[in-house]
Image (spheres, grey):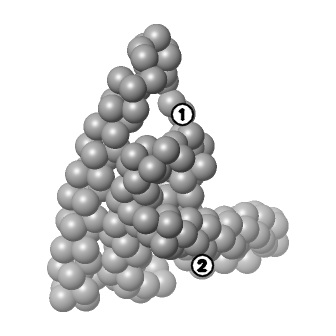
Amino acid sequence: MEAVIRIASTMSKWMTSIAKVVLTFMILLTVADVILRSFRRPIVGTYELVGFAGAVVMGFSIPFTSWVKGHIFVDLLILKLPQKVTKIVDVLTRCLGMGLFLILGWNLIGLGAVLHKAGEVSSTLEIPFYPLVYGLGICCFIECLVLFCDILKAFGGKYE
């Protein structure tokens, strides 16, 4: 159990590090493009690159945000329930989340295969879409692992 939790923690931290680097790239690219536009020399493909980068930042930051419980959590009703019931509700919501992210990840991997086979690329820079879609699918599977670890922590007595 501890090994699975350690793997999920390491993977989510690694993924958020990638998201941080890509976000920094996004900011620098946008600033450079705005400055160069004033000299009538815009960076070609900035819109596409920022779109791709935004998808990476969003997808790669989900597991770590979930790991540290950084999402908005409306628990007004849950706070009134006994701790045992709260734990059961949390486990049920984690199971539903795992189901959602499994379906999403599976479909993203399938879409990536279709895009790869079709040779679909972006319009200006002709960057293939499929690596990004595969990456987002993997992010969904890692989010499932994080949610599974939340369930393990709930049963292991280490639930936060």
Residue drawn at (21%, 82%) of the image: 113
Q: Nearer the viewer, mark 2 or mark 1?
A: 1
Vertical comparison of 85 with 33: above or below: above
Residue 105 or residue 40, whichever sits in front:
105
Q: Position of residue 21 (x, y in %)?
A: 69, 73
Residue at horizontal 29 percent and vertical 37 percent from the top:
92
Which of disc 1 and disc 2 is earlier in sequence?
Answer: 2
> Image quadrant for the N terminus?
bottom left
Identified by mark 2, the residue type is: Val
> In which image quadrant can residue 120 be found?
bottom left
Image coords of residue 44 (percent x, y): 60, 79
Q: Badge 1 is on which residue? A: 72
**Horizontal side of residue 2 vs 21, given as left or right:** left
Distance between mark 2 and mark 1 Cα atoms: 37 Å
Q: Is residue 9 visible?
A: yes
Q: Position of residue 140 (x, y in %)?
A: 36, 62
Task: Please give the residue where the numbered disc 2 appears in the rendered image.
Answer: 44
